[in-house]
Image (spheres, rainbow, N blue to C red):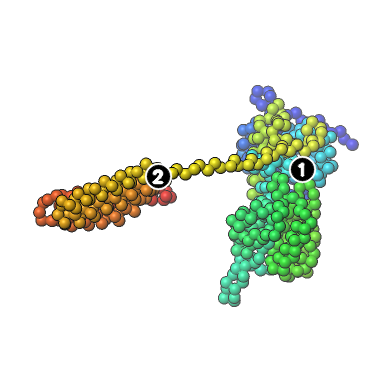
Amino acid sequence: MSEAPEEPEAEADEKGTAAPRLGVPKESLPGERRVAVTPDIVPALLKLGWEVHIEPGAGEAAGFTDEAYEKAGATLGQGESYRERSSVWTADLVVKVREPTVAEVGQMREGAALVSLLFPARNEATMQALVDKKVEAVALDKVPRITRAQSMDVLSSMANIAGYRAVLEASQVYEGFLGAQVTAAGTEPPAKVLVIGAGVAGLAAIAAARALGAEVRAFDVRPDTKEQVESLGAKFLMLDFEESGEGEGGYAKVMSKEFIEAEMALFRQQAKEVDVIVTTALVPGAKAPTLIETDMVEAMKPGSVVVDLAAHQGGNCTLSEPDVVVDHGGVKIIGYTDLPSRMATTSSRFFAANVRNLLKELGAPTEGALPLDLDNEIVRGALQVHEGELLPPPERKPQPSPKKAAPKTIEPKKPLEKPEPQQWRTVLGGALVLGIFTLVALTAPEAFVQRFTVFILACFVGWQVVWSVTAALHTPLMSVTNAISGIILVGGMLQGAQPTLNLATILGAVALFVASINVFGGFLVTQRMLRMFRKGD
């Protein structure tokens, strides 16, 4: 047995200091086509201080050539020496999509760091190998599902793609149209799709099915998802239960026996009616709950489809098998576990963006090491192996109890005998107008009294209309009063057209001039307001 070659030394930059290396190996799991870093992310990693090494051919299955990586600034191991071939595994930081094998961990440098999907509960051998190698292991699947970490949430990114792809896979084997069709040979109603679980994957499946024209129904144990489901155009199925399935981290919790029995009865009824069922229910760290039993599949129409997105974790359907399409009495049960990988280009871009955001959160490398701030909630939640020890789950921070709203203090209403200042002005104005009108009626000619009456009433009504409307509405009110101003224009023209020059004709001309200003100014202001709501203006 030949001795293992010595680990290569890190390259030195122009100043003679070691440049920390980030290695991106080609995924070894059969059928995995994604790559952890895409060419468009390389410049951001270089800016952070990493020297990016890409294994030749690592991105080919996802549509990213070696030339694209080199153009972006990455280094390829293309030579014959051990150092060039293994530079991605002996790097200070290795970034992968799927968890490494025990043999791959053995190629890593002791004390290096790993950022990857790990799923520690079902990869005990890999986790022990990481401990033995003293690798600082950061699990992307353990990034806390909090608002601040949304841009680093790989599980949500991949679930979004999986939900969308699930509907496309169903359409491949479903023996009919998903959307309604009207042809010369007759009409075909839309397919009925049931989506169980309204998380990220479920909502993506709902949106995809609705986009294809299907009639979509959805169920979730969390009543709060009803609004999201209905906003996508689907019908939310409800159970007459007070119990809520809201769990931690956006997942659903295990429900009571009575709730599950009612839930299963609902699914049995729906199985007789729908053409496609998409299941997305998962419980962290446990086998996926059984939602579709054999008798439900047998109740479905021949040609129907079940897509089980939980097949990798035991399956929501009792008949599903990982990575297999099972035909049971003419009903197809799809158990693909590589749905994101079937859209490798987009999935890789999403994955790489999540990795970039996580590395930004960690900060620039220090002396070739991955900076790990254990006081950072995101870092502590994702870090699984530290200094050669398997870390326990982080302590949950106590959630603050909701504060009760302080009782509102109802202020006593002011006595009716003390009117507001606005009311006093109205009363005084009305009394003044009444006094002037009485004086004019006793002394002026009858024709003048008639016109004066109209004038006073117009002033009074206009005053009340304007002052009774809030100031924010004065501009719209101006455009509305153009109609009233038009009446004044007509009256002013009739009065000012008299053959003799007297007070009446002068007032008519003044009214004509003032009303014209109001009309044209109102229209100009209205047009200016309308332009504010036009695109491109």
Q: Which mark is residue 417?
A: 2
- Residue 60 or residue 131, whichever sits in front: 131
Q: Position of residue 197 (x, y in %)?
A: 70, 55
Image vertical order of residue 10 relative to residue 195, above or below: above
Which residue in the rendered view is the most extreme toward the bottom? 185
Q: Residue at x 26, y 57 (%)?
A: 487
Residue 118 - label: 1
Residue, x 64% and y 58% (percent of image)?
206
Quarter that holds the N terminus? top right
Quadrant of the rendered structure where residue 400 is? top right
Q: Residue at x 69, y 66 (%)?
A: 274
Amino acid type of the residue that numbered disc 1 sits on in the rendered structure? Leu
Q: Is residue 74 left or right of residue 139?
A: left
Of marks 2 and 1, the one in the foreground: 2
Pointer 1: residues within 10 angstroms few (<14), some, or many (20+)? many
Q: Residues within 10 Å of mark 2 (few under 14, many from 20)?
A: few
Q: Secondary structure at mark 1?
A: loop
Q: Looking at the image, which residue is at 29% across and 50% down?
A: 460
User: Judging from the image, what secondary structure is the residue with disc 2 in?
Assistant: loop
Foreground pick, 84 / 249: 249
User: Separation of disc 2 and disc 1 at Cα?
Assistant: 77 Å
Residue 40 x, y percent position in the rendering: 61, 41
The x and y percentages for residue 478 are 33, 50
* Farthest residue, direction top: 15
Specify whether residue 536 is in view: yes
Quadrant in which residue 360 is drawn: top right
